[in-house]
Image: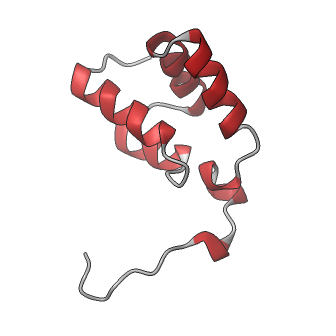
Amino acid sequence: MIKLNKYEIDRIIGMAMEDRTPFDSIKQQFSINHGDIIKLMCKQLTEKSFKKWRKRMNGRKTKHKKNFDKSFYRFKSKNQK
């Protein structure tokens, strides 16, 4: 696992907690794979919080781009970059 600073760890945890942010986006931004994200979350969260997060993420289609249903895409304004 690569060395991450406190800001990066906080950002990864925030992104991992979000329901609509795919793990692929985290990997692309921070070069950390799905397994390392799980290890990081286990290390940083309390046991109870980690178990709740894993239960919520298990089977969630929006967290894996290959399973991502196109109907979940949000509207993006032409003015938005």
* Residue located at (30% from left, 20% from top): 4
Q: In this view, does 16 lie above or below 69?
A: above
Q: Can residue 68 be seen in this view?
A: yes
User: Is any atom of residue 31 visible in this view?
Assistant: no
**Residue at far right of view:** 59
Name above or below for residue 65 compared with residue 52: below
Residue 81 against residue 65 in the figure, above or below: below
Q: Residue 5: horizontal and vertical position, in percent?
A: 24, 20
User: Percent x, y for residue 80?
Assistant: 26, 79
Quarter where residue 62 is shown: bottom right
How many discs appear? 0
Between 25 and 18, which is closer to the camera in this rendering? 18
Point 52% across, 27% down: residue = 37
Left or right: where 9 falls relative to 25: left
In the rendering, at what x and y percent does residue 18 appear?
Answer: 48, 46
Question: Which quadrant of the figure contains the C terminus?
Answer: bottom left
How is the structure coloured here?
A: secondary structure
> How far from the left and from the top, in percent, is residue 52?
64, 26
Q: Which residue is drawn at 53% across and 23% down?
A: 36
Task: Give 36 or 54, whichever is nearer the viewer.
Answer: 54
Residue at 49% from the left image edge and 74% from the top image edge: 74
Pick the quarter of the image with the N terminus: top left
